């Protein structure tokens, strides 16, 4: 069995497996747009490797042309999927024009006007440049690479380098056999493993995204998108430990909407949900990066303000209290919301969040008893 048969069989089989894996991931795990695009990329690759094999064994120019078109299309779809995953807009013109130029150049190279050197240069150059750009697009903003992302990034760079090496080695091709040794060596020794590795890394990225999504769902409230009680407890454990380690102040605020039950009863749960969403957004915008906002249950929210004394936290909440009345509810535009706030500062005897919550709850009760729509600070223990 020749090396070419083994290589083509491996690439074909890998494409089939990757297309199936991506299709399953799309069907069962959120139907994300970039996963569907990657599914299409590997599905095109399946037919591309079939055309490549047909062109090789039948020495068919049209099949080689079809294989070139498939490779350009598959690589373009992979790059589009990466751009979709990054949240960037996808311009059809941005990808279609270079792809059509590459397809046209490939067709010319395979025609009698072209040469084997041109055939070996054009498509690998396009794919190599595109994989390099895709690696750049994969770079995350404002955070570090996850392990699957880093593997995918590294393999995309390797893919780009290998393709450019193929394009460079094609310059040495002078005849039917002359100069092809280096080209074949790169194609058979490096490309199969890089191609398979890139596909596996893409699947791992999808799996990693799913795991991150599940972790977020476990720790976030689906209505308000802030932390739920579990997420707040975990964040508080870290914040308390950090405050003690660096001997920095930490403040907890417990707050809720005044008259929320009456609002729900009078205007329905949709109006109540709108009130909770607006209040949560206001709280999130009021705090700094690194502070924590969570929904403790019902209309009660908890905030952890790092490097803040009780007095500083109360000042922040006083501004929030004044802004709550300006929140507009689409279903009941004439209603004005009010909120009350209880503030407690971390003290030496606090071992966990519940210790702070107890004092903040007492302060919130005091705010309610004194007329609501106010901020109250927990009194120090006697």
Image (tube, rainbow, N blue to C red):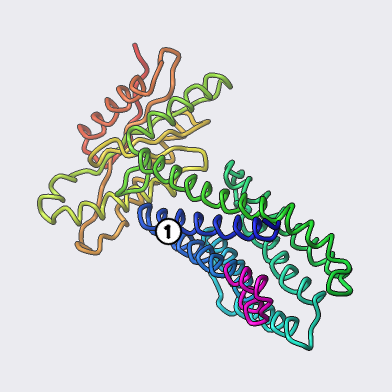
Q: Residue at x 46, y 53 (%)?
A: 21
Residue at 70% x, 56% y is 191
Q: For mark 1, what is the residue?
A: 23
Name the quadrant of the C terminus: top left
- The crowd level at tag 1 (other Cα within 10 Å; few <14, some 14-19, many 20+) is many
Residue 14 in the image, given as x and y percentages of width and height:
56, 55
Q: Nearer the viewer, residue 97 or 355?
A: 97
Image-based side of 337 in relation to 116, left or right: left
Q: Farthest residue toward the left?
A: 266
- Quarter occupied by residue 183: bottom right
Identify the image quadrant of residue 234.
Answer: top left
Quadrant for the N terminus in the image? bottom right
Give the vertical position of 382 relative to 207 (above or below): above
Magenta residues, dominant SS class: helix
Report the front residue among 14 and 219: 14
> What's the magenta region?
50-67
- Left or right? Give the position of 365 relative to 360: left
Measured as percent of width and height from the top left, residue 112 is found at 77, 88
- Give percent across and percent down for residue 117: 82, 74
Q: Is residue 26 above or below residue 71?
A: above
Does the magenta portion include 276?
Answer: no
Residue 32 x, y percent position in the rendering? 42, 59
SS state under label 1: helix
């Amino acid at each position: 069995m020749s090396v070419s048969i083994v290589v083509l069989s491996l690439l074909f089989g890998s494409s089939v497996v990757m297309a199936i894996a991506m299709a399953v991931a799309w069907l069962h795990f959120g139907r994300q747009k970039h996963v569907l695009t990657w599914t299409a990329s590997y599905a095109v690759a399946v037919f591309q490797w079939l055309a490549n094999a047909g062109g090789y064994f039948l020495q068919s120019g049209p099949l080689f042309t079809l294989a070139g078109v498939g490779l350009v299309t598959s690589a373009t779809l992979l790059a589009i999927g990466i751009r979709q995953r990054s949240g960037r807009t996808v311009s059809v013109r941005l990808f279609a024009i270079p792809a059509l130029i590459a397809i046209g150049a490939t067709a010319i190279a395979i025609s009698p006007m072209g040469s084997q050197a041109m055939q070996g240069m054009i498509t690998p150059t396009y794919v190599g440049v595109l994989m390099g750009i895709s690696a750049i697009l994969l770079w995350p903003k404002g955070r570090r690479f996850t392990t699957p992302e880093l593997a995918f990034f590294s393999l995309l760079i390797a893919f780009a380098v290998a393709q450019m090496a193929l394009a460079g080695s094609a310059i040495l091709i002078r005849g039917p056999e002359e100069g092809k040794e280096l080209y074949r060596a790169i194609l058979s020794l490096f490309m199969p493993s890089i191609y398979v590795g890139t596909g596996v890394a893409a699947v791992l990225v999808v799996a990693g995204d799913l795991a991150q999504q599940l972790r977020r769902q476990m720790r976030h409230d689906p209505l308000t998108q802030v932390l739920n009680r579990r997420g707040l407890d975990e964040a508080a454990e870290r914040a308390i430990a950090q405050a003690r380690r660096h001997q920095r102040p930490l403040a907890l605020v417990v707050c809720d909407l005044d008259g929320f039950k009456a609002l729900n009863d009078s205007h329905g749960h949709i109006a109540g949900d709108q009130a909770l969403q607006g209040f949560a957004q206001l709280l999130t915008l009021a705090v700094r990066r690194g502070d924590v906002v969570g929904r403790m249950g019902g209309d009660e929210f908890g905030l952890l303000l790092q490097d803040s004394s009780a007095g500083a936290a109360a000042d922040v909440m006083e501004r929030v209290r004044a802004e709550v009345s300006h929140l507009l509810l689409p279903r009941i535009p004439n209603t004005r919301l009010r909120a009350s706030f209880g503030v407690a500062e971390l003290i030496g005897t606090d071992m966990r969040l519940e210790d702070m919550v107890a004092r903040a709850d007492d302060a919130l009760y005091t705010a309610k008893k004194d007329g609501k729509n106010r901020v109250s600070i927990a009194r120090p223990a006697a």
